[in-house]
Amino acid sequence: MTTAIGVVMTECIVAGRLEDGKITGKLLRYPADPEAQEALASMPPGELVEAIAGQIDELMRGPDGAAKASADAIGVSVPGIVRAGVVEESPNLPQIKGMRLAADLAQALQGRGITAPVYAGNDADAIAAGVAATRGRLDKLTRVWTIGNGIGYGRWPFAEGVWEGGHITVTLDPKEKYCGCGGAGHLEGIMGYRAMRMRFLDLEPEEVFANAKKGDTRCREFVDLWHRALAGATASFIHLAGPGRFYFTGKNVGFLELPLLRSHLETMVRMSPLQSFSLEILPPDDETALVGAGVTAQRAMGEMQVTR
Ligand SMILES: [Zn+2]
């Protein structure tokens, strides 16, 4: 049996223990109070690492609270660009930019008497890994769009690169500049929650989508643009890496209408070998990313042992 600890840090930190790729026991949340969701954004990086280490410590204790269990690997997923254990960029948790997350966490764990290899990765990639693992598709290319405050793009299997799909350019209109990163014409500048609030200063995004359903022309046109933007980005990835399955999840995935997305995608992907793509909505949950964080860490550690 292999054991791993998976940790996902987005609006809150969720951690769990995996045995043979399946969650066993309870998940831990920090902050425990769901109302304190803004807490992480204002926490200094050292405290974030300690909070994660504390959760892992608790998960590795036996029922008597004393004995330390072991883990083959620990996987931590965060939003942003993560390479070789270092958080190179994280627009939604700016204080972790530049953090040597894998090394800092391993050190904090050593201080608690826990020695296990730590792997840090991107949160959307973890969801893709989790989908692949839970559906027995670890041998296939799996791509996931996460639709939330920002737009994330995740892929399994891991491939060297940056893969910031949310910042792919989908329009040449110079007026399109609402992306959180400051770049012009980006997908997130149209689809991201923050970007929508900046575009519609008089309406919340929920109202925009509700008004569109009632037939309001301005809102209907925007909802169409929102879907066309996602279709454009997805079509680009189909033209680069091929067709296959795309999953859509995240806390705002409820805005997505698959038939509308598909109709735009069909106008953009015309070469017959590329038309065998499929689209599927996944209800957002914590477990998928957590399983993916653990599975990715185990795979990464296994590959390191093979190449050693
Ligand atoms: Zn951007």
Image: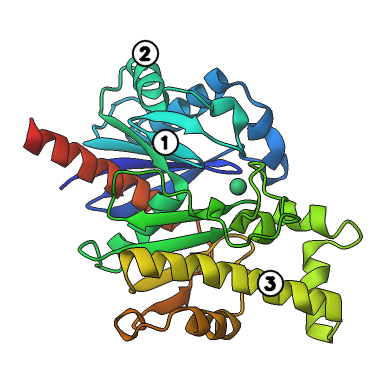
Ligand 1 neighbours mark 1 (CB distance < 8 Å) = no
Name the spot of residue 205 as percent of width and height, x first: 78, 63
Q: CA distance from mark 1 to mark 3?
A: 30 Å
Query: Of the residues under marks 2 and 1, which one precedes in the sequence?
Result: 1
Q: Nearer the viewer, residue 304 or 55?
A: 304
The residue to which callout 2 is attached is 111
Per the model, the C-alpha gap separating discs 2 and 1 is 24 Å
Identify the residue shown where x is 31% and y is 63%.
132
Task: Tally the numbered discs.
Answer: 3
For image coordinates 64% across by 25% down, the residue present is 43
Disc 3 element? helix
Q: Amino acid at mark 1?
A: Val
Task: Specify whether residue 148 is in view.
Answer: no
Q: Amino acid at mark 3?
A: Leu
Q: Is mark 2 within 8 Å of ligand 1?
A: no
First along the sequence among labels 1 and 3: 1
Mark 1, residues whose alpha carbon is within 10 Å: few (<14), some, or many (≥20)?
Answer: many
Which numbered disc covers residue 225? 3
Residue 241: image location, x then y, percent? 32, 64
On screen, 281 above or below 173? below
Mark 2 vs mark 1, foreground winner is 1
Return the residue nearer the eye: 262 or 32: 262
Q: Position of residue 184 (x, y in %)?
A: 66, 50
Could you tell me which residue is drawn at 60 percent across and 37 percent down? Answer: 91
Which residue lies under the disc numbered 1? Answer: 82
Res. 105 in view: yes
